[in-house]
Image: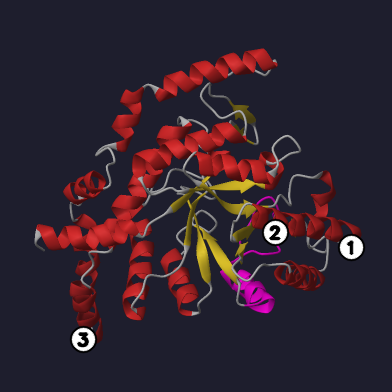
Amino acid sequence: MAQDRLNERIFQALNGLDIELPSWGFADTGTRFGKFYQDAAAIDIYDKIADASTVHALTGSASKMAVHVLWDFSTEHPPSEVAQAARDAGIHIGSINPNLFQDADYKLGSFGHPDETVQEKALDHCLASIAIAKTCESRVISLWFADGTNYPGQDSVRRRKRAFEKNLAQCYAALAPDQTLLIEYKPFEPAFYHTDVADWGMALHLATQAGPQAKVLVDTGHHYSSQNIEQIVAWLLDEGRLGGFHFNDRRYADDDLTLGSIDPYQVFRIFHEIHAYGADHGCPAKLDYMVDQSHNLKPKIPAMIQTVTWAQELFAKACLVDLESLRRHQAAGRIIEAEQCLQRAFMTDVSSSLIAWRESKGLPTDPLRSFRESGLLEERAKERRARRQALGMQQNSAYA
């Protein structure tokens, strides 16, 4: 393919790619065994906004930041103030994420809890989150439930299903006309016998029951090993029920590793299904691309830059699949030739096109190197270390 034609296709694809970064991805995180500290990690929501804004300024493809209601808002940091701070920094508040797993009352579940009083508490929190979304001019409310049971006979699976249907219907009724309710699924953890929303079929059922503004969110880490995620994506696209993604990578389960660090070809295949759907329908699929990663070892901002640039590269490669040839080979049963249409696109070197696209946007041609050379990581580590000391907070490790 001639370079001009290659650039044209890649520019068009990248101009439509906007990846939402998670506020929690810039803060100190850890595992169930302990919390790992970094001097440059964000202390508050305004630090998170500054860090997300930096990633967007360097990559040009991350104009929104997802927020977690329990972790990012307070009486000192009300939603209207936070939303304005984001706009002042050149980004916007993206999806609003209620917290339905951290409160001790949710030990036996939230929407599925056997006590209707706890269900009402969870519902009130979701309704308040929808109101916060309206204040922040966010059109997405993203729901993940830790609900489930650990032991056979612990609770009625069918009763819990009906409770979810009832409570999600009330959430749906509170949506503004332009808002979307995303329902996420996960096969296990923290529940180890059954999880109430365990797979895409259950999430699809709940979304269908709720109404057309409810869709399924696919977290690429929320699947059993070797599950065919791109098939799930294709089905949900065909049903008009794919709402978006929480992008990460995994080696075993929900590892929240950097996008493409383990299986970049899988991410490419997912993007291919999305491009193919758009080509078949004459317009790109309207999806929310979101990152859900907690970088315990990597420094926060560089890891997010790495994530976005990997997504840009894989998204660009996927748009190069020769769909016309692919369809001909598929119709004729030419298996090897059809597979090679994907393999050739995946192996295409798109680096010069990415550089050209970045230059056309006034962006650094190598965002990660530009950030490293800026000294911002060291500056923020120094400033935040001093602020923690002044606030009497726990001091972090030597890692920036």
Q: Which residues are magenta?
A: 185-211
**According to the image, label 2 marks what residue?**
130
The image shows residue 372 at horizontal and vertical percentages of: 34, 26
In x, y percent, where is residue 248? 47, 49
Q: Nearer the viewer, mark 1 or mark 2?
A: 2
Which residue has dot 1 on it? 116
Binning the other alpha carbons within 10 Å of mark 3 as few (below 14), some (14 to 19) or many (20 upward) gives few
Residue at 49% from the left image edge and 45% from the top image edge: 91
Q: Label 3, on which residue?
A: 332
- Chain-order first, disc 3 or disc 2: 2
Image: 395 above or below 83: above
Residue 390 lies in the magenta-colored region: no
**In this orientation, does residue 399 appear?**
no
Q: Nearer the viewer, mark 1 or mark 3?
A: 1
| Mark 3: amino acid | Ala
The amino acid pointed to by label 2 is Ile
Q: Compute the Cα span from label 3 to label 2.
A: 50 Å
Q: Are marks 1 and 3 in contact (CB under 8 Å)?
A: no
